[in-house]
Image (spheres, rainbow, N blue to C red):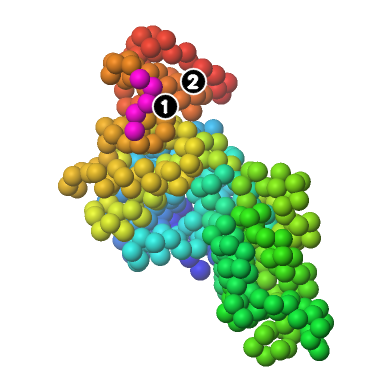
Amino acid sequence: MTSIIYLGCPAGERDDAERLLRDGHVSVVWADNVAYALDELGRRDIPVLVDLSRGGAALQLAQEIRTHRASTLMFAVVDERRPDLTTEAVLAGVADVFARPVGGRRVAGAIERELNYESSDGSRSGDDLYSHSPAMRPVIALIDEAAAKRAGVLIRGEDGTGRQVAARAIHVRQNASAGAFVTVNCAAYDTEELDAALFGANARAESYGDPGSRGLARVSREGRLHDAVGGTIYVQNVADAATKVQARLARVLRDREALLVETGEPIAFDIRPMAGVDPGFDRAVQEGRVRDDLFRRLSVIRIDMPPLRERREDIPSLANYYLREICAQLRVPPKTVSRAALSLISALPWPGNAVELRTLLEAVVNGLQGGRGIGLEDLLAHVRLDGGSVGVSGGGTLKQARARFEREYISTILEQHHGRISDAAKALGIQRTNLYRKMRSLRVGQGRRDPS
């Protein structure tokens, strides 16, 4: 069982929090102040979970622990009504942020992920979901539902929204020892190559007339389907697969049995099918480019992954993770991010989603000199003034371009903080009076106010 120090949890919530954490095999040491937490950390170095319900005061607790225990693994719990606290938590050195109520499996998975990260070269493993945003809550609920079953799962979303990450999370949560997680991208092969990749090069020809075949599909030990027996087969771009390949795959999934060509004997094929598809997949189904029998087996459970622009609360934690991953892989010292830079990262539209975010951060890290951190100017060298990455667009003089960018940027930050001037100014790294002056000069409205 994993142990954590839970700092600052309201007394009235502790019974429920302890029960939820225990479900994930996480035991709790309660701490009401930093002194007690540091005393416990002096005896054993275990992760710390800081409750940020008290806002700035709680953040000071996290910063104080980071000052005294730089190597301690820290996480935070936030309220969805305070999205600004996610940025503050990351700036305080928190590895990941959870929305309450905190699930034990979520915490245990994050701890395992971070410990694996620290002991490796920065490559990912297991359940890498950064998902405390409101938009991801129904996704997490469906992932948990899917993990409790062996039915097919269709995961739809734009490129870079984490379709494969969600599929792997289902596989891991289903059973830590639930066989292999096998991926096949149908768009990467022509028809014959895909047939050979799935079923094995020596299992291409069907032989329904063979004695004992019982009309079963033929599969070789060389095929990816055989690799997935007892585990999960995750197929991407299934609409690009030829009809005959779709038919063979549907038959294996239907029969849960196939004829092994090496022995000529039928064998059981217990495979969990999942598919990652783009938003146009439903049209492909309507147009008949996906067989109905295959579609039915792949879409028992359907999950829609929201784009990154709809889950901005997750961006600081995700960017922080990517930065540590990139620095480890490039063998350079870890980089810190300034408040203004992190605010810009959170405000950009990210049409390419997480893939674009990681690509931008990799370009920024590669362009830095020495061991310094990442400031706003480092990011601006790699983004367009219309919010995309790499390059400049819009035309006009430099003064006009800067004003255009500042107008769009300030408007986005104000919208992110529901029109709260104090929070927006803090995120921008400027005084309230300066923000008011810029809003007047750039003709920026305050936007929608948060009634709370």
Q: Amino acid at mark 1?
A: Asp
Instruction: Indicate whether 403 appears above or below 359.
Output: above
Res 320 visible = no
Q: Residue at x 28, y 57 (%)?
A: 330
User: Foreground: 33 or 63?
Assistant: 63
Measure the alpha-carbon separation of dots 1 and 2.
22 Å
Nearest to the eye among marks 1 and 2: give it. Answer: 1
> Which residue bears the numbered disc 1?
386
Mark 1 is surrounded, within 10 Å at the Cα level, by few (under 14), some (14 to 19) or many (20 or more) other residues, namely some
On the rendered structure, is 54 left or right of 249? Answer: left
In this rendering, the count of numbered labels is 2
Q: Position of residue 332 (x, y in %)?
A: 24, 55
On the rendered structure, is 9 left or right of 442? Answer: right
Q: Amino acid at mark 2?
A: Gly
Q: Position of residue 436 (x, y in %)?
A: 37, 13
> Which residue bears the numbered disc 2?
419
Residue 273 part of the magenta-drawn span: no
Q: Position of residue 165 (x, y in %)?
A: 54, 56
User: Foreground: 24 or 393?
Assistant: 393
Q: Residue at x 58, y 62 (%)?
A: 190
Q: Position of residue 246 (x, y in %)?
A: 71, 63
Q: Residue at x 74, y 49 (%)?
A: 285
Q: Residue at x 79, y 56 (%)?
A: 292
Q: Which residues are magenta?
A: 391-395
On the rendered structure, is 254 left or right of 170? Answer: right
